[in-house]
Image (spheres, helix red, strand yellow):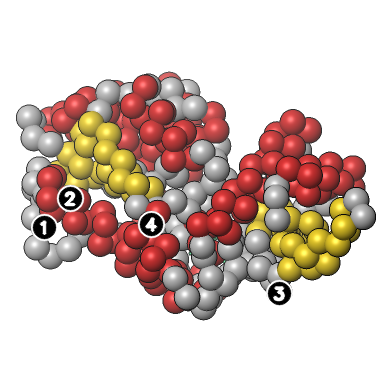
Amino acid sequence: EWKMDSFIDTTVEQIRAQVGDKGVVLGLSGGVDSSVAAALISKAIGKQLTCVFVDQGLMRKDEGDFVENTFTKLFDMNFVRINCQDEFLSKLKGVSDPEDKRKIIGTEFYNVFWNKIRESYGSGFFAQGTIYPDRIESGKGDAAKIKTHHNQVGVPEDIKFEDIIEPLKDLFKDEVRAVGEKLGLPHDLVWRQPFPGPGLGVRVIGEVTAERVRILQEADAILRDEMDKCGYADKMSQFFAVLPGVKTVGVMGDARTYSELVAIRAVTTDDFMTADWAKIPYDILGKVSNRIINEVTHVNRVVYDITSKPPGTVEWE
Ligand code: XMP
């Protein structure tokens, strides 16, 4: 407790001393680390901080608005949201290979983000939410490389900042969360489950379209809602819906349907290198299935993924 209080006080003083009257820009993803870094720097320098939030339209339902509301209402800063779902989707048109999709999303993110910085904020200081394990894991083993992860964003050579500020660089995740709570970040943000950088782009299997993203967002929101209501959410390390892109036959009233399948994935794990599928009680799964089929148009079947890691990965792509 007191340790985190004194960490906050000391770090706020350090940031003020280092930054002076210059500006600081930070890329906000809505994840725990960048959010806590943003809150901390906001406490130190208020509107001298600009947070740039690239909303690629591949986040969970209403998540972009939640991030915007949190940082504009609860914290003093200059908050810039770039809505660019259309650009991302046009780049993803016709692409179904998972690694190609990751590369496209990563590259597009890099371009949108740095073009904005170049245009308006390419001086002063650059801040990021690097934490202690990130620095150790930079030399990660092969297991982590089975899929390319696109979280690290290097600064392009033509942009010259005074320095890079990484206020959380010596903290572990639980310490980062404790600091976030002290700074008044919402519980949902501080305890947010891991969410892949490419977002729903790798949960809509195959080609990503606006309509398929919308269907997945609706189904995923219902799953989340039911898990929160029954109190089971905290028992899992990560859970989400997947849209495999398979159509199956069903029956509704006396009519035949031929619609999308939704899969539910839920795991328990300590480190995400191995994971067990979560033993969610049948009645909860049943409720989720009924609601998804009744409330999400174009979905007529729900299945539960009972594959552990290995041999399955947590994500489907
Ligand atoms: P897998 O699917 O590799 O997932 O078993 C392990 C953990 O990593 C997350 N994940 C990603 N995170 N970019 C990320 O930032 C990615 O491309 C990516 N792919 C998977 C996944 O959600 C899980 O927590």
**What kind of element bears circle 1?**
loop
Q: Which residue is mark 3?
A: 311
> How crowded is the residue under tag 2: few (<14 C-alpha within 10 Å), some, or many (20+)?
some
Of badges 1 and 4, nearer the viewer stands: 4
The disc, 4 or 2, on the residue closer to the chain's N-terminal end is 4
What residue is drawn where x is 58% and y is 63%? 204
Q: Position of residue 35 (x, y in %)?
A: 39, 38
Report the amino acid beneath label 4.
Answer: Asp
- The residue located at (47%, 23%) in the rendering is 1
What residue is shown with label 1?
A: 159
Name the residue beneath numbered marker 2: 117
| Depth order, front residue of 15/152 | 152
Any part of residue 44 in sight = no
Q: Earlier in the sequence, mark 4 or mark 3?
A: 4
Q: Residues within 10 Å of mark 1 (few under 14, many from 20)?
A: few
As shown in the figure, which amino acid type bears the numbered disc 2? Ile
Tell me the kind of residue under disc 1.
Ile
Q: Which mark is residue 120?
A: none
Query: Which type of secondary structure does the marked residue at label 3 adopt?
Result: loop
Which residue is the site of mark 4? 86
